[in-house]
Amino acid sequence: MADKKIFIFDTTLRDGEQVPGCKLNTREKIEIALALEELGVDIIEAGFPVSSPGDFESVSEISKIIKNATVCGLSRAVQKDIEVAGEALKHAKRGRIHTGIGTSDSHIKSKFNSNREDILVRAVQAVKWARNFTDDVEFYAEDAGRTDNEYLARVVEAVIAAGATTVNIPDTTGYCLPAQYGEKIAFLINNVSNVDKAVLSCHCHNDLGLATANSISGAIRGARQIECTINGLGERAGNTALEEVVMVLKQHPTLGLYTGIKAERLNPISRLVSDTMRMPVQPNKAIVGANAFSHSSGIHQDGFLKDSQTYEIIRPEEVGAETSKIVLTARSGRSALAYRFKNLGHDFNRNDIDFLYEQFLSLADKMKEVRDNNLIALADSYLQSHQS
Ligand code: KIV
Ligand code: ZN
């Protein structure tokens, strides 16, 4: 069977930008949108046009510039929101309105003081309003992760009948387990009569650290779009990390799923987003963290130096990262020390290294990391004492 494409819907500029401190101006948003297009994302959610004049301007300007990707604007299921989104997107070569409403009983009662039947009517109405502006309408069933599946299936069927071409099933609170989220997607595929007329989309938050696992589980069970952000930015604990889903699918070709992302651009765009949003990436972040390709324990270093595949499943150049690093700490071994000396131009023999290793260890016990300048000093003093 032919491999199936997973559409990558990037929401760094909308869900990611909602993070306190990450706000961007139009110029910054355009720079990131262009980098996302270069990366190969299929859909760029550029903002929430009704939320502020600045965001309206950003979505409008991005719509004028982007050539290949679809540009998307968010709205609530409110006529004014949808009209403003339609206006902001009017220059887009391909424009999408993303509208929706909460469907869990918690949202229906606490947010809307309403009932399931009323919400169904409002959902259908929102899609019809949006279709006045574009044929590409995505509906989100907010808090779908905690929505009763039977009711969710009714909503999904009704919005597809009203003209939604993509239906987003957000795990808004990051509550679901991977198997549960996958079951939800499978339930919709098996119980919504017109599901073949729309793409189902995963939008998973990371409150329990399961966002990537849930999105992959949804894709395995039939969703064809994943919503994600660079560096996993997003509300609270964040959204699904784009770089993670892309590399999971690349590393596991037997899943039969692929994306159009140019993986070698993942690290450069991660740095661009981190710098522009002033949001550092945690060092141990998969794919794009500073330590993602660093080896520091003696056992790992020895194996890695014999064959990199013993401790690395991805080559750093595949994802545009700098070369793998051998970091020297008190947990490092002789082969790593010899390797680092060799890089500095000292080809010491086994006896030299045995001697130098004892000196290195006493230094390393006092420091977090032994750096090149420390090694140079060690080598100089060793050579002086052994030459005289
Ligand atoms: O998390 C969520 O439910 C959202 C929707 C607005 C799509 O971000
Ligand atoms: Zn979200």
Image (cartoon, rainbow, N blue to C red):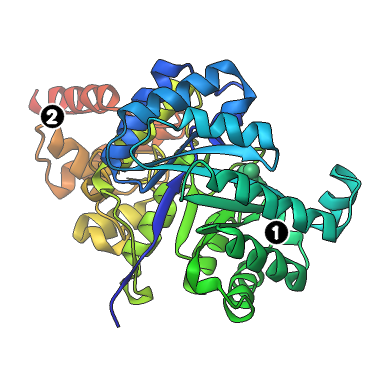
Instruction: Report if residue 321 is visible in the image.
Output: no
Q: Which of marks 2 and 1 is in front?
A: 1
Circle 1 Cα neighbour tier, 10 Å, few/some/many (<14 / 14–19 / ≥20) = many
Q: Locate the C terminus by quadrant.
A: top left
Secondary element under disc 1, as helix, strand or loop, is helix
Mark 2 vs 1: CB contact within 8 A: no
Residue beneath the point at 34% across and 27% down:
64
User: Which quadrant of the structure image shows residue 76?
Assistant: top right
Amino acid at circle 1: Ala
Q: Where is residue 179 in the image (x, y as percent from the top left)?
A: 62, 73
**Within the image, what quadrant is residue 291 found in?**
top left
Q: Mark 1 points at which residue?
A: 144
Q: Disc 1, ligand 1: is the CB inside 8 Å? A: yes
> Judging from the image, what secondary structure is the residue with disc 2 in?
helix
Of 360 and 189, which appears nearest the observer?
189
Q: Is residue 325 left or right of residue 70?
A: left
Residue 386: give its label: 2
Residue 384 position (above or below residue 206)? above
